[in-house]
Image (spheres, rainbow, N blue to C red):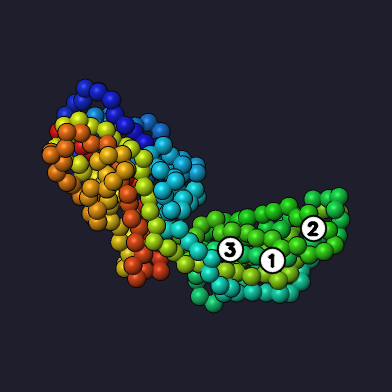
Amino acid sequence: MAFKTGSETLEEDHLKLINDIITNAIVLKRYIYSKGDTPETLWNDTWIEALNNSDGDDSSIDTANTTAEYVSINKKYINSSSLGSIIASDSTEKSTNYSTYQLVKTITLTTPSYVYKHTNEVHTSNTNVLQYCKIRFYYEDSTYHEVAYEIRCYSTYCSQTYENPDKTKKVTKIEVYLKANSSTIYERNDNVYDLTFNDSILQTTSILSVNNPASISWHVVADIPSGANITVDVSYDGGTTFAKTGLSSTDSIDVSAQTSVDIVLKINMNMGTSSEPISIYGFGVTVSK
């Protein structure tokens, strides 16, 4: 959700609010985390982006040039991830003929780890009834998320993949559940894969077009782990070229030499020496005259 202003007449408290939003990281973070549906009255030439669309495909995000990964559960962008190697497995065969979910297997990781996916092999003894396998991912903070699929493989084992819904948290254990209806469902050969995070880009569309600008200020609301960093590149011409590069996540630049600006930001999410991802929750941009 983004709020771009028109030509409202503002009272003094509104002006102070906007000044705080752009210049004070704590105020901006509170504003974006609230993800309210009703915007405050904002002055002209200001953009606040909360990144809370269900799929992250907001009008202010250039999805064609964005390589960062959107996590809909947490309403944020993180570094993209690549499939790693198997870090835990259990090849034993389990089954059930109960019509409610039954816990058949628990895989506890030796060390809490970032997990990309869980795989197994499943099949049923009857093609005419619904059978299910559910994977529950437990995280370090004791929360969990589930992924479940209807199983349509009859007699012969088929491979099934369950992608971890929240790659921003380390997984401590995985539980496997089966549910059958007037039949039997089987599963085996469970594997848990870790991941690696990649340098990524979150790029905006043209978010502000302003004549006779004096300066541009912005702040990116993010959690940046030790060893990682964010830099920002700024385009004045709608993203064709980036006139300023390598700037900090909270910064301001003089653009008084420009007769007009058509602003695009490229937010570079650099992993550096970190093994943990950067999380971006939103950003604010304003142009002063």
Q: Is residue 213 visible?
A: yes
Q: Which quadrant of the rendered structure holds the N terminus?
A: top left
Q: Which residue does the image show at 32% across and 49% down from the upper left?
A: 266
The answer to whether 226 is drawn above or below residue 15 in the figure is below
Q: Secondary structure at mark 3?
A: strand
**Residue type at numbered disc 2:** Cys
**Chain-order first, disc 2 or disc 3:** 3
Q: Which mark is residue 117?
A: 3
Percent of width and height locating residue 263: 27, 39
Q: Are marks 2 and 1 in contact (CB under 8 Å)?
A: no
Q: CA distance from mark 2 to mark 3?
A: 20 Å
Q: Which quadrant of the rendered structure holds the C terminus?
A: top left
Percent of width and height locating residue 93: 76, 71
Q: Looking at this view, is 197 or 240 the one in front?
A: 240
Residue bearing mark 1: 120
> Residue lying farthest front?
240
Tell me if 80 is positioned left or right of 225 in this view. right
Percent of width and height locating residue 152: 78, 54
Q: Which residue does the image show at 16% across and 29% down from the upper left?
A: 12
**Residue type at numbered disc 1:** Asn
Q: Which mark is residue 153?
A: 2
